[in-house]
Image (cartoon, rainbow, N blue to C red):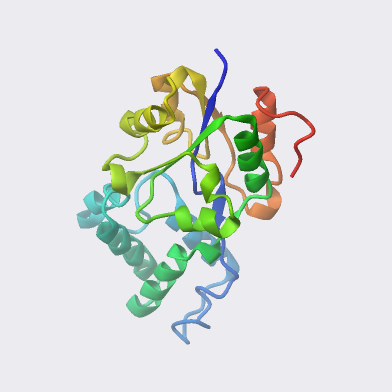
Amino acid sequence: MAIDGVLFDFSGTLFRLEQDGSWFDGSIGDPGLIMDSAAQDRLLRALIAPTGPGAGLPAGLQHAWERRDLEPELHRLVYVEIMRGAGVSTAHAEHVYELMLDPAHWRPYPDTEVVLRALHDRGTKVAVVSNIAWDIRASFARLGVADLVDAYVLSYVENAAKPDLRLFRTACDRLGLPAGRTLMIGDSEEADGAAAALGCDFQLVEPLPVAERPDALLRALRDRGLLDETVVA
């Protein structure tokens, strides 16, 4: 069956949270904090991991971790606690958390804008399906592509989080398409790949640093005949 709609994950798929090395080196918070680049990278990966247990969280906060993408206040609580567990002061962790929510720190992959524009021009419907605790549309607006997305299906709004099939079903319904005519593209086999149980096609992409993944979205869409070689990043 032809694919008439594409569902995209947000973090690690269309955009990626990237910091400049100053967030945890003491220059914006604790003067005495010493954290090398490898430790910073590990902490950032823990903060953006789509699935799995919360790294370093006490057992009493595991329920909050499981509900983090449904309730914004719990999202803040557990992410600040993860940073505190890595040796960051509460005030510094709160500041870094605000940086995480800033669209300026969510960098689009090199082919994100190209893909969204090409699908829109082709008449292919697009939904963004994200486990997230804040309104990510500002990131798309900053890139100038917010109006190229037909539906934003966000966990904290819908009170359901991937791999719950309700989130994918909602996206398909809002696009007016059966699941069998959609493709889900995401960076998590567990969370995003669950769309296959509803009948969606699925393509995994690696959540690599932006500079290291120039055209994974383009290749996924070319492989399914949705875009051709004339569309380039």
In the rendering, at what x and y percent does residue 164 appear? 32, 33
Quadrant hosting residue 218: top right
Residue at far bottom of view: 31
- Quadrant in which the C terminus appears: top right
- Nearest the viewer among 136 and 60 is 136
In the rendering, at what x and y percent does residue 167 appear? 35, 34
In the displayed structure, would residue 179 be above or below residue 66? above
Residue at image coords 42%, 25%: 176
- Quadrant in which the N terminus appears: top right
- Nearest the viewer among 196 and 47 is 196
Residue at image coords 70%, 41%: 215
- Nearest the viewer among 166 and 30 is 166
- Nearest the viewer among 219 and 178 is 178
Residue at image coords 34%, 29%: 165
Q: Is residue 225 visible?
A: yes
Quadrant hosting residue 173: top left
In the rendering, at what x and y percent does residue 60 appear? 20, 56
In the rendering, at what x and y percent does residue 42 appear? 51, 59
Residue at far left of view: 60
In the displayed structure, would residue 153 be above or below residue 5? below
